[in-house]
Image (cartoon, helix red, strand yellow):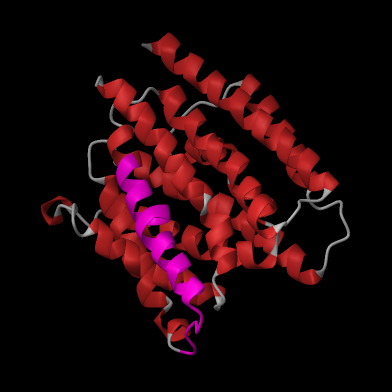
Amino acid sequence: MKPQTEAIMFLISAAVLWSFGGLLIKSVMWNPMAIAGMRSAIAVLVLLLVIRKDRFTFSFSQMAGAVFYSATMISFVCANKLTTAANAIILQYTAPVYVAVFGIWLLKETVRPSDWIVITAAIAGICLFFIDKVSPGNLLGNILALASGVTFALMIVFLRMQKDGYPLGSIFMGNVITALLMIPFMFRAVPKDFNSWIALFLLGVFQLGLSYLLYSIAIKSATALEGIMIPLLEPILNPLWVLLFLDEKPTAWAFIGGSVVILSLMIHAKIKSNQIGTRQ
């Protein structure tokens, strides 16, 4: 099998595994902070099988990537418990918008006028999520989902800074940080139903551990467009699984806003790919 074909298969597999996050998180009857901690603790055990300890440099970019990865894991799990899975995942996937902004200062990248048009459209889509009359809990969930998009963007920026380093080290340390920080929540009470433990196992081993292994392998051979576009399967499939298995439906405004955001991200990915192709 050709490396690029294998990379595409790995990217699709990673996106599908990520997409089960909303369903599995909502299936665990436990505190969201404890879920985040246990999910990362299990993922650490998976990553230990392949991690290269000699590649840890503890550089600023590697540690910053780990910190923002941890913040993303915690805020995303909490958002899934407080708002719909559709809102949580689509608002998190606004990350490319923030990457473009942060890239100006941290990576010295140039943002073209076409990028700003797409970014403005995505922001307009985000605003539609907050038109509905929602309970304080759902509002907090939407805010946490947006926050997870910001931290996810910062994580991506600091991982990109390690293009000649070891970004998987940030992922590993981020899971360690999350597990350690959430220990107090994990021991307050534990799930008593078997289904919750099955969901936690699937979250840690497949939805987090295996998915990031596949992505880290695939991104070495995939094109820039494939690396950005294929993972967009996640915000499309994530709400679908929750709808099919838990009958959780996004509101009309959230559906419209999500469509605007996803379309904007696809256009943004295509623009970036064309810019990279022009430079090569």
Q: Position of residue 170 (x, y in %)?
A: 31, 54
In front here: 235 or 101? 235
Write the residue at 40% across / 76% down: 181
Q: With respect to residue 278, does 126 lie above or below?
A: below
Q: Quadrant of residue 28?
A: bottom right
Q: Main secondary structure of the magenta part?
A: helix
Q: In this view of the protein, which residue sits in the foreground, 201 or 114?
A: 201
**Residue 118 on the magenta span:** no
Q: Is residue 46 above or below residue 192?
A: above
The answer to whether residue 5 shows anywhere in this view is yes
Residue 269 on image: x %, y %: 54, 26
Query: Residue at point 56% right, 19% down?
Result: 271
Query: Where does the magenta region start and end?
Result: 188-214
Q: Residue at x 67, y 59 (%)?
A: 246
Q: x%, y% of residue 147?
A: 60, 57
Q: Quadrant of the N terminus?
A: top left
The answer to whether residue 213 is magenta is yes
Horizontally, is 59 left or right of 54 in the view?
A: right
Tell me: residue 81, above or below residue 110. below
Which quadrant of the figure has residue 70? bottom left
Number of numbered discs overlaid on the protein picture: 0
